[in-house]
Image (tube, rainbow, N blue to C red):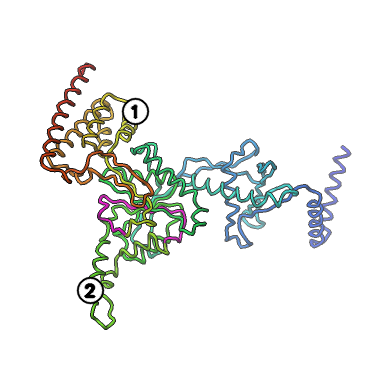
Amino acid sequence: MEILSQMWSFLGLLTVLQNVLPSQLLSLLHSFYESLQDMFTPYSYFEIPEFNGYCGVDVNDLYRHVNLYLNSVNHSSTCRRLTLSRSRSSNRISFTVAPNHTVHDTFRGHSVSWTHHVETVQDSLEEKRSFTLKLPKRHRQVLLSPYLDQVTSRAEEFERVSRERRLFTNNGHGSYESGWVSVPFRHPSTFETLALEPELKKQITEDLTAFANGKEFYHRVGRAWKRGYLLHGPPGSGKSSLIAAMANYLCYDVYDLELTKVSDNSELRALLIQTTNRSIIVIEDIDCTVDLTADRMLKTTSKRMRRGRETCRRPEGDEAERGRVTLSGLLNFTDGLWSCCGEERIIVFTTNHRENVDPALVRCGRMDVHVSLGTCGMHAFKALVKNYLGLQSHPVFDAVESCAGSGGALTPAQVGEILLRNRGDADMALKEVVSAMQARMIMRGSGGGGAHGLFDDVAESSPEKALKVQNWDSLSPSGKGVGMGSNKMRKEGKVKFLVRLRSLTKSDSGRRGV
């Protein structure tokens, strides 16, 4: 009791002194006390406020990184109280350190701690927030800079993975403050569910990983941190699904650029400036959106008309280029000075007819990787069957492989539609796939070829040799360098194969009692 009474007497004396002594003297005594404490304590303290300066406008980026870093590390065992939250657009539960609580961490064998301070501003509803970092004083020069670098890198990685990704499209007003509108990007396509050959999947994922981790490399060699992909193949070969899988693999936003809504090259540059880092910029059907190949013909004609003229007059081609996107503007968009206004971007062009794309758009440095997509190989077909029907193997797989090797292969979209329609009956679904392959073989044998006759041999190796894609269809294009006699022999061989295939199907049905 005597100890408690002495403590109360001491507190009362402090209260009296605080009311009697002038504020300047109290401030001086407080500073002297903190100096004595800093002199004898074995730790150093670093305060990180929420805002820079005193106006409360400039957000301290380091404060945000510390908050993300503490959220990325599970400190539930070292902190007694955490604040939990979850946004409407995300299923992830995030937590922060509760006000005026401390969480402990380790770095290079040393113990460090973070304290979250929240103070209410006098005569205001606003709050003053800050983090205080406590480090061993003896090793602060060695630990401070590397530890903050680790906090920043871990925070950026956590933000990239956990943030909600968006799908943007241009609204036709690129010259204004915001030329993009967006919705949440929730496409389910991944490389695990994608119908691609395993070697092609491996090559693409390794290239994407090397690009995402290549910040120091691109800066060291003096190149803009971007990469170009050209996806070409028949309709339904999986170009859009591959783009979605790339975005989900890298956790990037997607900008779907509709060139027909872009009025001129200036608006195209404005749209590029408004895109964010860590994004994929997609221009689908690059050969069909705008007439880019006509630019070269127009300029050639203008040069011929200027020959022999001594007066300097504006060429007619320049008048025609006004008010539209030109090939020159698109080239500057992909590989010019304006292309380096952001970092960690991937530009993707898609086309059904690679030969119709201007060679200047697909050369090295613009489209670094050429991916040729075509009909389903057996690995891709088995992946589709596993995804849609849940089957690892089936007796009809041999018949499917024979049909694919004889020119009856289908695109992933065609196979997926058949499997989706008959997902309740696996046997019926696979038999219908075989029937569709047989019909395709008969059409090719009769010289038709269907809608995709031009895509019988779509897999070509990339001219940049950045990514080689082997041909999935072993047959050469029909009608190319083949005489009438060889065509007749091939038709007869296909007829014999179909007769043999029907007999195998009947015998297989008899064994199962169908």
Which is more N-terminal, label 2 or label 1? Answer: 2
Check residue 176 for magenta coloring.
Answer: no
Type of amino acid under label 1: Gly
| Res. 366 image quadrant | bottom left
Residue 383: x %, y % from top left: 34, 33
Residue 220: x %, y % from top left: 52, 57
Task: Please state if 137 lies on the left or on the right of 92 as rendered.
Answer: right
Residue 296: x %, y % from top left: 26, 65
Comparing 180 with 319, the one in front is 319
Q: Residue furthest right?
A: 2
CA distance for labels 1 and 2: 64 Å
- Choose mark 1 or mark 2, whichever is in front: 2
| Res. 471 image quadrant | top left
Estimate how packed mark 2 is, as few (under 14), some (14 to 19) or many (20 or more) residues with alpha carbons within 10 Å: few
Can see residue 192? yes
Task: Please state if 501 lies on the left or on the right of 171 as rendered.
Answer: left
**Span shown in magenta:** 339-359
Q: Quadrant of the N terminus?
A: top right
Dot label at residue 247: none
The residue carrying mark 1 is: 390
Who's the residue at 56% across and 41% down the image?
Answer: 84
The residue carrying mark 2 is: 304
Comparing 264 with 28, the one in front is 264
Type of amino acid under label 2: Arg
Q: Quadrant of the C terminus?
A: top left
Mark 2 falls on what kind of element?
A: helix
Mark 1 falls on what kind of element?
A: loop
Task: Please state if 503 lies on the left or on the right of 268 as rendered.
Answer: left
